[in-house]
Amino acid sequence: MVRKYILENYPNCIRKKGCSKDALDLPYSYTSPCAKGLFDDLFYWDTYFINLGLLHDGLADVAYNNIKDMAYLIEKFSYMPNAANYALINRSQVPLFIQMCFDYYQSTKDISFVRAMYSVMEKEYHFWTERRSFENGLCHYGNCADDKFHAFFYDEYKGRVKHIENKEFSKEQVGDNAMAECESGWDFSSRFDQRCLSFAPVDLNSILYANEKTLAFFSSLLSIETDYEQRAERRKQLINKYLHCQKGYFDYDVKNDKIKVFYTIASLLPYAYGISSDKEECRRVLSHLETEKGILTSEKVETECIYQWGYPNMWPNLVYFAFKALDNLSLVEEAKRISMKYTKAVEDEFNRCGKLWEKYDAVSGEKAKVNEYSETEMMGWTAGVYVVLDDYLKGVRK
């Protein structure tokens, strides 16, 4: 029933042009996260997971249009904005464009596509390494707004999380860090103590490592001599030096020179992208997050804030990263178990109300109740990840 619903609703998510009043003009049609609802633009990391589903369902042409629109925006801004909307162009989001291109190539084996996108991939990569780097070589999230906008954003941030923890910060500092957290995609979470600019995130640096490995692969494919393999090895060394301890991989607080040991799905990305092959360590991290009904975004923490990217929520895109980590390490039993819990939660809620949702509750297995804004009917990553994991459980690998 869910798979049929997804196939029927793909066309309802395709937009010829931006529908919101602040939408950017795009050269190609694109896939929005919602058939109807709150999110109507081309969103960055949402589209990565949308494309996974499209490629699995044989809709490579639709996925290609999404990629071409993103390439257009990267050429225009040097980075892919949070979304193709004037209100959201002052920050990027999780840099998954290169991985999106890799997935498309793996599905189509189209070398001409790689040749066409190669310079765009490099352009985005250099934005992150040149505009989002600490002196030690690790990268961080940030934004491209000025202090006037930071002060303006303070009110939106406080309205969503309800409490400001760093009383010594000015409105501009609070807004600056909050916008960096928006760039992380985890808006908002207790991961960064409302000081996102101070952290080298484990997920970001793991993805950049994967991007360097992918660029090395594409360079070899096109017979271009580069140093991306060496860059990847250097980043791997930095991740293992600064972001790893006996308990696993975590975000590194650069300002205070210490690891923040706090279990989130972000801690699984080094296993997803080949930085570590330690199965037992991966299992231990998983044990802090898995529930009877699903997998938590993060462990529980006492706070006065409302954080939707935390306990007890289960976000489909993060479920995919957890699955990718387990699958990459050939932890078949665990990968199947997580896949079954996620698909069951989606199916049970769909059978109850006939809808897919942006996120779910990993404790109850129902629609999420912790929200910073009104919940919206969803396709997006909920559908994309469902398709991938449903195929996996059926023994279909693409």
Image (cartoon, rainbow, N blue to C red):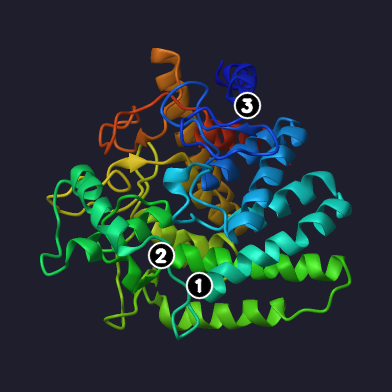
Say which residue label 3 marks. Answer: 14
Residue under label 2 = 142
**Tag 1 secondary structure:** helix
Front-most of 394 and 42? 42
Q: Calculate the distance from the C-alpha at mark 1 to the C-alpha at mark 3.
A: 33 Å
Q: Element type at marker 2?
A: loop
Query: In the image, 77: left or right of 195?
Result: right
**Residue 202 visible from this viewpoint:** yes
- Give the labeled residue for mark 1: 131
Q: Residue at x 78, y 50 (%)?
A: 106
The three-letter amino acid code for the residue at tag 3 is: Ile
Residue 326's disc number: none
Alpha carbon separation for disc pair 2 and 3: 30 Å
Query: Rounded to the nearest whole Å, what is the CA distance between mark 2 and mark 1?
Result: 9 Å
Residue 254 at what x, y percent from top left?
Answer: 34, 79
**Front position in the image: 197 or 23:** 23
Q: Position of residue 68 (x, y in %)?
A: 71, 45
The residue located at (58%, 35%) in the rendering is 384
- Labels 2 and 3 touching (C-beta < 8 A): no
On the question of residue 274 being in view, the answer is no
- In this picture, is 328 found above or below 60? below
Q: How crowded is the residue under tag 2: few (<14 C-alpha within 10 Å), some, or many (20+)?
A: many
Q: Are marks 2 and 1 in contact (CB under 8 Å)?
A: yes
**Please, what secondary structure does the residue beneath circle 3 have?**
strand
Q: Earlier in the sequence, mark 2 or mark 1?
A: 1
Q: 144 or 299: which is nearer to us?
A: 144
Horizontal side, residue 268 vs residue 251: left or right: right
